[in-house]
Image (tube, rainbow, N blue to C red):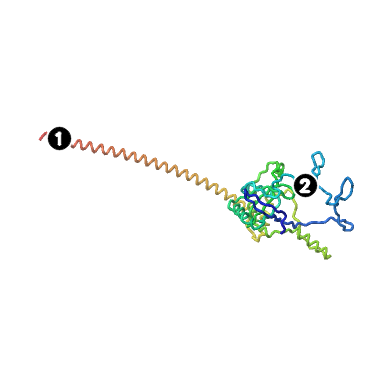
């Protein structure tokens, strides 16, 4: 790969010389515009609207259009004289958890490589610090003629950077969601859960651009003068009012057949089982709560009975002791009388 930018990462007082490489490449289908009559290429020429003549690239410069429509020419020297600290520096501003970055802000992706032997150690230091903290770095940099935000993170053993849009460049989703009140039934959610479980996981490495392959096959067939192979039937488009439950059930069945799972219990029964399970769980919870309350009442009653029994036992013991003392006193009196009469 060829580097597209050279500069450095500013990490506090640590400076890391780096080279920037594009991390992605486009494989999308591109078409040329041609004259339908003879197939001649249609090209665009840069023409001065005042003189109506084509202008070569070396005679073209930049200009900024003011709100009133006036254009102000700006040369490269004018732009180079601007105080731009991030012109050749990725200036790290902070370290934040990755989930605090809204994916809507992410733009282009790049790989960052150390530039020179002396850059290896600070490069690895920043990489390991990011790994251990489980955070990403938010930075500012100037790239492709403009200053932008960037997010630096670790990909394998490499530092990667995603340029980011400024917060005021993200549109708010006002008026996008349904403005009417929509009620989703538990049975519909259960079917949606079943469909999600049936579809399962996916290996992203196995996905490919079927449209590009179809275009390439069509072009190859035309070059060979043969009929292009038939393509798969187009899926039905949206815009139709459908029975949501029926659509979900059909989707679950199709997903099960597609995964080779054969005939399974109908989706309605599966959804009903989930609903029944939830109700059973709720009822079980209620029974457990009632049982706990009943146990608590019994325990309290037993404690009260024990206390009452204890009190009764103490009272009986006192009465018995009192009777015994009375008997002893009577016996002493009788013995004294006998001695006196003798």
Residue found farthest to the left: 342
The residue depicted at 78 percent of the width and 59 percent of the height is 215
> Dot 1 lies on which element?
helix
> Which numbered circle lies on residue 336?
1
Q: How many marks?
A: 2
The earlier-in-sequence mark between 2 and 1 is 2
The answer to which of 16 and 155 lies nearer the viewer is 16
> Which numbered circle lies on residue 249?
none
The quadrant of the picture occupied by the N terminus is bottom right
Residue 212 visible, this angle? yes
How many C-alpha atoms fall within 10 Å of the one at disc 2: few (<14), some, or many (≥20)? few
Rendered location of residue 241, percent (x, y): 73, 48
Rendered location of residue 308, percent (x, y): 36, 39
Q: Is residue 287 left or right of residue 124?
A: left
Residue 200 visible, this angle? no
The residue depicted at 68 percent of the width and 47 percent of the height is 140
Which residue position is annotated with label 2?
77
Q: Classify 218 as above or below 82.
A: below
Rendered location of residue 37, percent (x, y): 89, 57
The CA distance from mark 2 to mark 1 is 138 Å
**Residue mark closest to the camera, 2 vs 1:** 2
Q: Classify 222 as above or below 192.
A: below
The answer to which of 176 and 105 lies nearer the viewer is 105
> Dot 2 lies on which element?
helix
Q: Is residue 242 left or right of residue 100?
A: right
The residue depicted at 33 percent of the width and 39 percent of the height is 312
Rendered location of residue 154, percent (x, y): 63, 54
Q: Classify 284 as above or below 233.
A: above
- Discs 2, 1 touching: Cβ within 8 Å: no
């Amino acid at each position: 790969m060829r580097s597209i930018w050279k500069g450095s990462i500013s990490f506090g007082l640590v400076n890391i010389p780096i080279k920037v490489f594009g991390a992605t490449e486009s494989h999308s289908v591109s078409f040329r515009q041609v004259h339908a009559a003879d197939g001649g290429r249609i090209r665009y020429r840069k023409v001065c609207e005042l003189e109506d003549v084509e202008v070569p690239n070396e005679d073209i410069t930049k200009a900024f259009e003011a709100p009133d429509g006036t254009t102000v020419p700006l040369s490269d020297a004018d732009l180079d004289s601007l105080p731009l600290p991030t012109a050749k520096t990725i200036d790290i501003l902070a370290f934040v958890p990755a989930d605090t970055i809204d994916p809507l802000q992410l733009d282009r992706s790049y790989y960052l490589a150390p530039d020179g032997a002396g850059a290896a150690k600070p490069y690895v230091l920043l990489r390991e610090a990011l790994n251990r903290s489980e955070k990403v770095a938010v930075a500012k940099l100037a790239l492709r003629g403009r200053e932008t935000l960037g997010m630096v993170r670790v990909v394998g053993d490499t530092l990667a950077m995603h340029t980011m849009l400024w917060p005021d460049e993200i549109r708010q989703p006002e008026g996008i969601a349904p403005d009417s009140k929509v009620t989703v039934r538990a049975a519909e959610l259960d079917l949606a859960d079943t469909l999600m479980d049936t579809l399962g996981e996916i290996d992203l490495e196995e996905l490919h651009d079927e449209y590009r392959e179809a275009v390439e096959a069509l072009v190859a067939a035309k070059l060979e003068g043969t009929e292009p192979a038939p393509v798969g039937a187009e899926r039905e488009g949206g815009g139709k009012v459908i029975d949501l439950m029926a659509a979900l059930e059909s989707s679950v069945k199709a997903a099960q057949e597609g995964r080779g799972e054969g005939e399974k219990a109908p989706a309605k029964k599966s959804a009903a089982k989930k609903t029944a399970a939830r109700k059973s769980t709720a009822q079980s919870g209620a029974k457990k709560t009632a049982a706990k309350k009943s146990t608590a009442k019994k325990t309290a009653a037993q404690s009260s009975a024990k206390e009452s029994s204890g009190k009764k036992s103490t009272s009986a013991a006192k009465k018995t002791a009192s009777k015994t003392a009375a008997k002893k006193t009577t016996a002493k009196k009788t013995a004294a009388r006998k001695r006196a009469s003798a």
